[in-house]
Amino acid sequence: MADTTEKGYGSGSSDDGSQVLTFDRPTGFKGLYYHPVTQIALLGFVCFMGPGLFNALNGLGAGGQVDSATSANANAALYATFAFAAFFAGSINNKLGSRLTLLLGSTGYALYIGSYLAMNIHPNAGGFVIAAGAILGICAGLLWTAQGSLMLAYPTESQKGKYIGLFWTIFNLGGVVGAAVSLGQNFHSEANAVGNGTYIGFLVLTLIGVTIPMLMADPHKMIRTDGTKVTTPRHPSWKVEIYGLWVALKTDPMILLLFPMFFASNWFYTWQFNEYNGALFNIRGRSLNNLVYWMSQIIGSVAIGFVLDKQNLRRRVRAFTGWAILLAMVFVVHIWAYFYQKNYTRESIPADAVKMDIHDHGYAGRLWLYIFCGLLDAMWQTTTYWLMGAMSNDPAKLAHFTGFYKSIQSAGAAGVWRADAVKRPYMGIFVSTWVLLVAGLIFSLPMIHLRVKDHTDIEDETLARMDNTGHIHSADLVEPEATKPAK
């Protein structure tokens, strides 16, 4: 029989009357090291040094360059390969293990940031930047799938919003630190592009981040705060892992209703970073905007995480509350942004234009809009992860779900970055952003109504009941095992 007694089903739900096999947590330094908060913090620092600094660079608009075409094409290549790699990354993660998958994934960020340094030194190195973007897409698919699996598997059901908020806070500190470095380097600059020192600083930090996965604990040894184990060792063949991907999709088709929400989840970056921040502001203004954007992400993720984990409300009520907050934020941000976007076009701002500085009239209002853009981004991503976490506690299944998420997300991002590269009108990209966000919320509503329950049951965990040969055991045969006393 498949060993499914240590998966943590019903974790955080001791009030439902179910009995779950529990284990004593280690104490002392070992207990601190193997604490889920410590491991989520280390996971956050992996993404702080990689995706966080990548975000800080991208948030400057055009990757800190004057010409946005190379950056847009690199992002299109990145997200195209990301979309392909992420779809299968759950199977790779489950086969190789999360630590090795994180290590392989983090290396691509150093290469990508190094390519921008190369372009600053050799202006004709645009092809290298685009190639580095394509390689990073494969690496990012691995990293984000492993990250999502661990982030959603380590907390109990009552802690998922808080743990996502903790991760998002540390991860976005990468954007904050990167933006602060950029602001310090470029505060007295009147140019429209960053210097070599900014890229070198980013590159050194990213290389440090590559080493962090080697310091993380083996997920098989992790015990949640309620005493349930996160997972048990499973080493199925590649064939069974690929079959598991199909099983995850077939047995939980409600995940399809989240695909439009996934698709929209990175689409808005193109308008925010290039069509707004990159188009309107000089490098000093872009750097300050970038700093407050990533700082606001921390506030947004913690705030929505608090709402989604509010224990005096049923989980279904919290899900609908999060949905309503997102809908309100989408309309607040985009109605506000429309009154700025209607006043300029791509053609009205030539490459050599004198752009808005932090001391110019009207800058403060535009800065506040960018803060609200950051809040919306963090709330959207946190809620999306939380909804997936409400569907399962099984790391193998969550690896597939987060792989779907990053794959669909990246397919959308590849399309909109390519639209920017071929100079589609600013207003067209802005309207498409608004429409896709609303559509994502509309499609997710029936999924929340039909699929989100107050507790996750073993009947929902098909992959957890699948053994190494691909055979799926029935829930009524598996569940009694959970009542066995701990050895």
Image: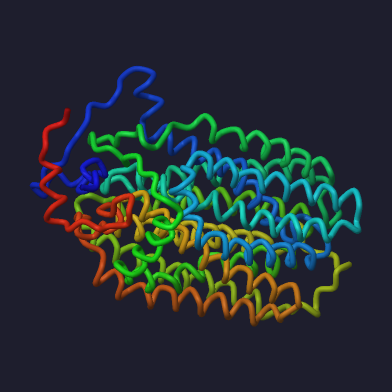
Q: Position of residue 367 (x, y in %)?
A: 63, 59
Colouring scheme, one of rainbow, by chain, secondary structure, one colour: rainbow
Residue ID at (43%, 49%): 94
Say if 164 sits above or below 417 in the image.
above
Left/right of residue 11 with respect to residue 104 in the rendered view? left
Front residue of 30/98: it is 98
Front residue of 340/444: it is 444
Q: Position of residue 173 (x, y in %)?
A: 56, 42
Residue ID at (84%, 60%): 126
Total marks shown come to: 0
Left/right of residue 341 with respect to residue 402 in the rendered view? right
Q: Position of residue 30 (x, y in %)?
A: 37, 21
Check the picture and name the quadrant holding the C terminus.
Answer: top left
Which image quadrant for residue 458? bottom left
Residue ID at (74%, 38%): 201
Q: Can residue 324 be seen in this view?
A: no
Front residue of 422/485: it is 485
Residue ID at (38%, 24%): 32
Say if 46 sits above or below 392 in the image.
above
Q: Is residue 11 visible?
A: yes
Q: Which residue lies furthest to the left in this view?
A: 17
Front residue of 392/330: it is 392
Left/right of residue 201 with respect to residue 270 in the rendered view? right
Q: Position of residue 395 (x, y in %)?
A: 36, 49
Which image quadrant for residue 360? bottom right
